Amino acid sequence: MQHLWKTYGFGIVFGLLLTAFTAYALLDVFVIPHRYESVNASSSYEDDTQSASGKPSGSSGGDQQLPDSTQPEASDSQSADGAATSDDEQPESGALTGDNGSSANGESAGNNTPSDNRDGRNDASSPATSSVENSGSSGSAAEIISTDTEYSDGNISISITTCRKYDTDIYVADIRLSSAQYLKAALADNTYGRNVKDATSAIAKENDAILAINGDFYGAQSEGYVIRNGVLYRSSAVRGKEDLVIYADGSMEIIVESDRSAEELLEAGAQQVLSFGPALIEDGEVVVSNSDEVGKAMSSNPRTAIGILDDLHYVFVVSDGRTRASEGLSLHELAQFMESLGVETAYNLDGGGSSTMYFNGQVINNPTTNGRTIRERSVSDIVYIGY
């Protein structure tokens, strides 16, 4: 035994130390939360970073939710180094079966009343999705499944329409605002940092959101601009990276990070800068091709996108995917669908298991990472409509 220790002792100790260091490094990158300070300390929005008195005990997926996996979660199409994650596997033969998305899960949000300080009425203006009845450049028209989920209070008007196209259920929120101040973003735990995550629905509830979608999962990246509600959190640029800028007047613009600094954008009035991409629509024209994809993601995925039609008139779009009931969209299909809505500018956000739409206390789509279980994936941030 002593002979073996003298011969191999150093190697054994070195191996144990290396294993411990590797385990710590992986935990540090993917699990251990790190909270950082913002680059600038003030915001031009009021009450954007205030938190609720208590965090919700869980997300609002109801009976469809299963316990979270113990494995670290990451952005669907990009990990910290930009590589594809294991979430991009095709569903197994036993993938989830179900209807086409017009179940109670997709419609129940309309039966939920807003919080006491809002007057929710079913008198929202006609949704942008009426334009999907026209074939346009995207081929046959989408089948409209449901249009009975609405909210309106004088400042905010939202109408949710569920469509069926490309063998996929697509949820479209048509939004009209009286002011851009109601278009906001929020961070998980209202904290900027790495591995600070929560479900879209939990972040939405914490910030009293009426409508919310997942954001760009900034926490899965070490670079790329992060501006939320007029606060600059990260200013390191990625060469060639396309960002969506939402300005204080509610207008949207696609920029390339290497062309303009985060400080310049902030000075120009940027309230939100989302760094995922790519751009889908610019000046009303599709700007992605059939060959474009995010990282190494498979072509058909759950997707999340945001677009603007006119002054203070927006759409949030989320598609299901990776199941027998809903195949999912390629980037080009998503862009074509956004074009059929008549948007002037549209941008792709984090997708896959992150793709979630929350409305009036309910998750109204069917989020899934692997196609076998319906549950939300924890994310770094959301884009939402609220007070």
Image (tube, rainbow, N blue to C red):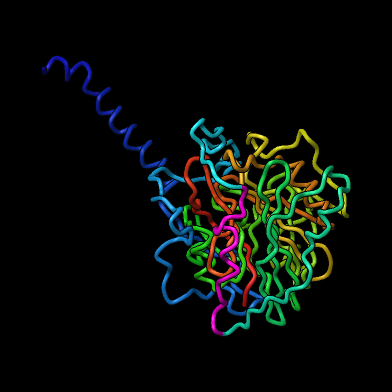
Residue 279, x across and y down, in percent: 77, 49
Q: Quadrant of residue 91?
A: top right
Question: Residue 355 location, x and y as percent?
Answer: 59, 51
Position of residue 57 relative to residue 6, above or below, is below
Q: Which residues are magenta?
A: 100-116
Task: Please state if 31 lies on the left or on the right of 301 as rendered.
Answer: left
Apparent side of residue 145 relative to residue 34 in the rendered image (left or right): right
Residue at screen point 60% across, 42% down: 325
Q: Quadrant of the C terminus?
A: bottom right
Asked which quadrant contains residue 183, the reply is bottom right
Viewer-proximal residue among 131 and 313: 131
> Of all residues shown, which one is farthest toward the left?
1
Query: In this image, 243 relative to 36: left or right?
Result: right
Residue 230 appears in the picture as rendered: no
Task: Judge by depth and name the residue closer to the eye, 357 or 123.
Answer: 123
Residue 366 lies left or right of residue 263; in this view the side is left
User: How many numbered dots are placed on residues in this image?
Assistant: 0
User: Which residue: 68% across, 35% down?
Assistant: 299
Residue ID at (41%, 73%): 54
Residue 113, by quadrant, is: bottom right
User: x, y percentage for residue 53?
Assistant: 43, 77
